[in-house]
Image (cartoon, helix red, strand yellow):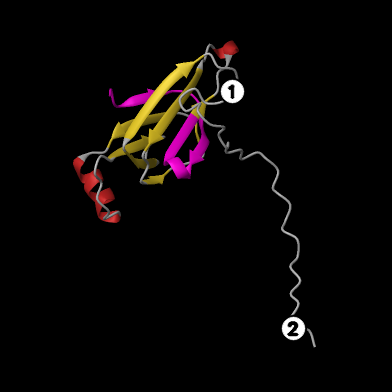
Amino acid sequence: MDLPVSFERPLRLFTYVIAHSQVLFRGEGDTDAGLTTVEILFTDVGALSIRDHYQSLTIRLATGPEEEQLRAADRRPWHDWRAFILEAGPGSNGHVIAGGMFWAESSAPPGYRSFLIPSYDLPQFCPDRPPLPSDPATIYTPYPRR
């Protein structure tokens, strides 16, 4: 794996599959700007501190002191996990503790399903979606009635 890697383009959280411990970021393609679609997938995710959108992003492995601090915050056995640091600018780091990280580019059109994890229909994180209607009011009735 060649890290650090930098993506000088907007990326957004595309999906977070908790049951499979996967986090997927996507940068949509833009033919006018000459950009293909890029995806970044973290697998076997144990912990994370991320944003839903990045204007640009550099991903690198944690330094020794950074990893020590992250391990102190999460005392579980790490087994094959690594600490990936997400840098979006000075002083704005996040992290993903994961077993693996993959990235790929494709000419997939906007709205296309993931090409890194195409095996199932992914729930997509859509921050611009209108809020869901509120839950209906609950009416409590004592039982038995008297």
Q: Quadrant of residue 87?
A: top left
User: What residue do we see at 49% from left, 40% from top?
Assistant: 16
Q: Quadrant of residue 128?
A: top right
| Residue furthest bottom in the image | 146
Q: Which residue is mark 2?
A: 144
Q: Position of residue 76 (x, y in %)?
A: 27, 53
Q: Quadrant of the C terminus?
A: bottom right
Q: Which amino acid does the dot numbered 2 rest on?
A: Pro
Q: Position of residue 108 (x, y in %)?
A: 55, 17
Q: Does residue 82 appear left or right of residue 89 in this picture? A: left
Q: Which residue is mark 1?
A: 112
10 Å crowding of disc 2: few (<14), some (14-19), many (20+): few
User: What residue do we see at 28% from left, 24% from top?
Assistant: 1
| Residue furthest front in the image | 144
Q: Position of residue 62 (x, y in %)?
A: 26, 38
Nearer the observer, disc 2 or disc 1? 2
Q: Which amino acid does the dot numbered 1 rest on?
A: Tyr
Q: Determine if residue 62 is in view.
A: yes
Element at label 1: loop
Q: Start and end of the magenta stretch?
A: 1-25
Q: Which mark is residue 61?
A: none
Element at label 2: loop
